[in-house]
Structure formats: C-alpha cells, structure tokens
Image (cartoon, rainbow, N blue to C red):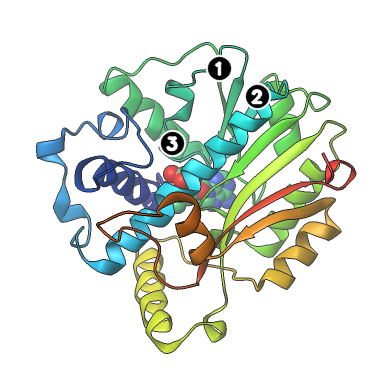
Amino acid sequence: MEATPSRTAYRVALRRAAHQVFDDPVVFRDPLALRILGMTADKLELNQLRAPKRPYSRSLRAFVVARSCFAEDMLHEAVASGGTQHVLLGAGLDTFAYRNPYPDVRVFEVDHPATQEWKRALLQQNGIPRPDTCRYVPVDFERDSLLDRLVAAGFDGRAGAVFAWLGVVPYLTGAAMRSTLEVLGALPGSGKLVLDYGLPRAMLPPNEQLALDSLSARVAQAGEPFQQFFSPEQIGRELGDSGWSVLQDLDGIAINARYFAGRSDSFGVLGKGARLLLAAKHQQEQG
Ligand SMILES: C[S@@+](CC[C@H](N)C(=O)[O-])C[C@H]1O[C@@H](n2cnc3c(N)ncnc32)[C@H](O)[C@@H]1O
C-alpha cells in the first residue's frame, strides 16, 4: 500500500456517502461525503459497495458512521473547554477539516503520503477548498517521526489535542502502534484519543467469525491486511503502558444505545467484534 492510495480509505468514504443516501434519519450528516468522491446521490457507485441494504453492509456502515460521530463529539467537548487542535491520524477521505465549524481549531491531517496526495487531488477536482485551519502532515507510522512532522506543520505539543485514529490501528504493526501511542502519550499538553479496534477472532461467535473472515479477505485483497486484534484487557494494557487511561470502551450494544436508539429501520451495529474507545492522558483522567 505504500506507493498507492489506500483502498480501504476509499471504501469507508463510500460507506459514509451511502449513509447520506440510504439511512433515514441520517446520524452523521456530512455534506461533503458524496462530493469528495465526485459523486451525487443518484450516481453513488453502488457497485463499489457490497449490497448496501444487506445486514452486514449496514452494520459496517453504522460502525463507520458511529466512530466519526464519536470523534467529532469528543472534539466538540474539547472545544467547549478551550481545545484548539484536532489531529486525524490516518485521515483518509475524512471531510471534517473542510467543514470545520470552529474557527480556532487547527486540523492536522496525518496520513500516508500516497493517500494524502490522492486526497488533495480529489479535493481539487471536486472543488473543495482547503481552509487555512487545515494542515497536511505526510507520515508513514511504520517509518517516520510523527512528532517531528506534526511540529513542522505547526502542532503545539503543549496545547493539548484530540487525536482521532479511526479505522487505522487494525492495519498497523504492534511496533508502529506502540511508538505512536508513546510519542503522543508523552506530550506535555492534555490529550484525548479516539480509536477503534477489533476483538480477536477466537472471542467471536461463529457467525461473526465468518463475517470477519470475509472482511479480512477483502482488506487483504486490497493490499491492506489486518495485522492486529485486541481483547479489551490487551488494548487497555497497551494504552496504559504508553501513558493513556481508557475512559470508555464501547461495544456494539453501547454504540447502538448512543447513536442508533429508537430507530424504526434497525440501522445499527451487529455483533460485538468492533469497539470504539476513548482514552485520556494519565494525568488528566479525572478531567
Ligand atoms: C480504513 S482507512 C480509514 C481512513 C479514515 N480514518 C476514515 O475513517 O475514513 C485507513 C487509513 O489509515 C492510513 N494508514 C494505514 N497504514 C498507515 C501507515 N503505516 N502510515 C500512515 N497512514 C496509514 C491509510 O492511508 C488510510 O487513510
């Protein structure tokens, strides 16, 4: 995947676009979700997605939608107490930076250089301007010094930040994940971290194992195989060893209660394999 743009980034962007078209009510309203792909509602390339109305496809879409909502909710809370920095780690085609409603919040889009270049071309092609608050930070988590590049882009390590690492951790090696967690955990400023992770196959019931096998095969075929899964205890230890405390670790039931309660269309996350986590730096876990 190093020399080519991330195909999984394209697929999750399609899911956010499909949410605008297929799900009512829309939970994650993103007026740029279709536009960044150069699509309109009637031209959404449905053939790129596995049947969008199938239960498993809806569930994946619900998870993608929920994690974006969760990250933006956490940013909203941080802004209310003076936060000014949002860091999208593995930004993919996330559109937050281009609809950022907070004039004082700088958004740092960290991504693999090939994916970032592709995104910038898409933004240009589709007439989406880059606000002054948006900074690009090309980084390969497996090789580059994240902090040096963030600082070069204007990031202030003392000022605190919300870090959103959405749909990325499963694709990294343990070493790259750990070094990133350690670097961010050691910054002097306050910090919140939102990430998602998957439970190990052996912890899942048989029907979910099959669904995971199918998804694993698809991402591997896209050249971005899953590399790591965690139990809640394991990820809690990884975070704890790197300066982070887990504040929330949401399973499918908790995600559905938070974002999809009371719907008549049963749109929501199926099963318990995918989890959404919020962590804070050790010293501010009470804050
Ligand atoms: C599934 S996409 C998720 C994108 C975005 N966070 C979202 O939710 O739409 C995975 C993202 O992780 C990035 N990524 C994966 N491995 C990476 C690495 N080693 N260094 C930098 N970015 C990486 C990819 O470029 C891609 O943007």
Q: CA distance from mark 3 to mark 1?
A: 16 Å
**Looking at the image, which is closer to me, 176 or 12?**
12
| Residue appearing at x 67%, y 55% in the figure | 248
> Looking at numbered disc 3 in the image, what kind of residue is underneath it?
Asp
Residue closer to the observer: 182 or 273: 273
What amino acid is found at the position of numbered circle 2 in the picture? Val
- In this view, 27 is above or below 154: below
State if disc 1 and disc 3 touch (CB < 8 Å): no
* Drawn side of residue 157 relative to residue 29, left or right: right
Question: Extreme front residue here?
Answer: 262
Q: Pointer 1: what residue?
A: 102
Instruction: Give the amino acid type for the residue marked by disc 1 in the picture.
Output: Tyr
How far across and down, in percent of the image, does residue 264 sit?
26, 56
Q: Is residue 58 visible?
A: yes
Q: Is residue 247 left or right of residue 206?
A: right
Q: For mark 3, what is the residue? A: 94
In this rendering, which labeled residue sits more in front, label 3 or label 1? 1
Instruction: Give residue 167's position: percent from left, percent from top.
Output: 50, 53
Give the mark nearest the N terminus, 3 or 1.
3
Q: Which mark is residue 223?
A: none
Q: Is mark 3 within 8 Å of ligand 1?
A: yes
Residue at the disc numbered 2: 79
Q: Residue at x 56, y 83 (%)?
A: 203
Along the line of sight, which residue is nearer the eye, 200 or 26? Answer: 26
SS for dot 3:
loop
Q: Looking at the image, is mark 2 or mark 1 earlier in the sequence?
A: 2
Mark 2 and mark 1 in contact? Answer it, CB < 8 Å. yes
